[in-house]
Image: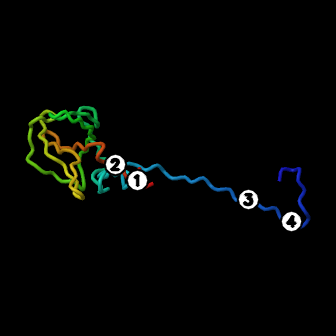
Amino acid sequence: MTGNETQKPGAAAIALAQPEPETRPLPGAGGPAGDWLCGWCNNPVANERERFVIDGRDEFSFSNPEGIRFDILTFSETHGCHQTGAPTLDDTWFPGHAWSFCLCDGCGQHLGWYYVGHQKFAGLISNRIVRALYLRN
């Protein structure tokens, strides 16, 4: 009541329930919300906490010999993926690191490359993976 209304005798004031704002902590890099999934089958393939910095960066853009451009994110390890092909230094994007293909265990999609050299890491193609954070809200 605002003070200008009068309440009828015997009538109880009715309190209207106000919705409480929903508060949820922002998802961290660990756990399912930090997962990166195959863009085709949603198989978990990496986790945000495993992002890997090489030469001060963890995102790169390269073109292969046919001129096809790839934007990749680097990870120290992957899950739900497997290596195929013999590692080669031919046309490597990271000097001193041989590459082989990285395929999804769930559907076999080519998701990127594994690199071996003085460091081991994976480069996953950014438009072939998706954050679980955006799918599981």
Whole-number angstrom distance, CA of label 4 to CA of label 2: 57 Å
- The residue identified by callout 2 is 130
x and y, in percent, of residue 136 in the image: 42, 55
Question: Which is more toward the observer, 113 or 28?
Answer: 113
Identify the element where label 2 is drawn: strand
Q: Earlier in the sequence, mark 1 or mark 2?
A: 2
* Residue 77 % position (x, y): 23, 48
Label 3 Cα crowd, 10 Å radius (few <14 / some 14-19 / many 20+): few
Q: Residue furthest bottom?
A: 10
Q: What amino acid is at disc 2? A: Val
Q: Amino acid at mark 1?
A: Leu
Q: Count residues near mark 1 (Cα–Cα under 10 Å), then give few for <14, some for 14-19, many for 20+.
A: few
- Among numbered discs 1 and 4, the one appearing first in the sequence: 4
Separation of disc 1 and disc 4 at Cα?
50 Å
Regarding mark 3 in the picture, which secondary structure is present there? loop
Mark nearer the viewer, 3 or 1:
1
Query: Badge 4, how many Cα within 10 Å: few under 14, some, many 20+?
Result: few
**CA distance for labels 4 and 3:** 15 Å
The image shows residue 52 at horizontal and vertical percentages of 26, 41
- Residue at image coords 20%, 51%: 103
The percent coordinates of residue 122 (x first, y second) are 21, 44
Per the image, the residue denoted by label 4 is 11
Check disc 3 and report the residue beneath it.
16
Name the residue beneath numbered marker 1.
Answer: 135
- Picture layout, residue 86 above or below residue 94: below
Q: Mark 2 or mark 3, which is nearer the start of the sequence?
A: 3
